[in-house]
Image (cartoon, rainbow, N blue to C red):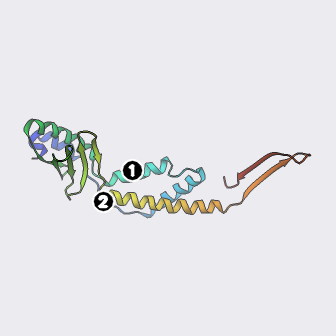
Amino acid sequence: MEVSSIFGNSFNYMFKSNSVRYKKWKMTDELKTKITELAKADVKKRKYMDDEYKELLTHEYKSVGPDREALKRAAVSMMHQSNTRGLNSLEILLGGNKYISTGNEYGFGQATHYYDAEGEEVLCYTGGSGFAVVPTKIEERVLQEMVRTYKAAWDEAKANRDKQPIAASVNIDITGVIIEESTFDTTI
């Protein structure tokens, strides 16, 4: 069943602007340089994976994945329709990509799994916990490559920082008692 057959053309048209922009992704030299710069800056701040890196990671991750929010909205509408019409299997057209929903009524609870056109699961819905995002292979690859690049740059920057000399100062009064002892990093 197509979404347009339940909701009319206006519903189908609403999702045409939300085209799915995923499938091919490659780590560019520009992106690798940006990640390396962020890792070096994070080493100086002594904070692993600071917010700016997390924002970049989230942006890249979302740019290759399907529009799950649109799928969730459509799925909730379809679930309400299926409750009234008794539908077991749904096909949803979003941006020219077909999403298929299958229900599972066995076991301890009910679950509905949503798949993209290639058969990869992208969402799972259970009554007890709601929607759960299931990462696609390309999303996992983006995450792995970006984290691997960041970790290598972080380790290199940290090793370079640790090679820097550390200055120490000790203040001793006339009687030989240590008044103040401090150690500080000269690289900051």
State left or right for residue 36 relative to residue 22. Answer: right
Q: For label 2, count other residues whose C-alpha is less than 10 Å away and answer few (under 14), some (14-19) or many (20+).
A: few
Q: Amino acid at mark 2?
A: Lys
Find disc 2 in the rendering and name its residue: 137
Quarter-of-image position of residue 135? bottom left
Q: Secondary structure at mark 2?
A: helix
Residue 182, percent from left and from top:
75, 48
Give the residue drawn at x 63%, y 59%.
161
State whether residue 43 appears in this view. Answer: yes
The residue that appears at 37% across and 59% down in the rendered structure is 142
Classify mark 1: helix, strand or loop.
Answer: helix
Residue ID for mark 1: 59
Locate residue 25, reporting x and y percent: 34, 61
Q: Amino acid at mark 1?
A: His
Q: Position of residue 185 (x, y in %)?
A: 69, 53
Residue 18 showing in the rendered view: no
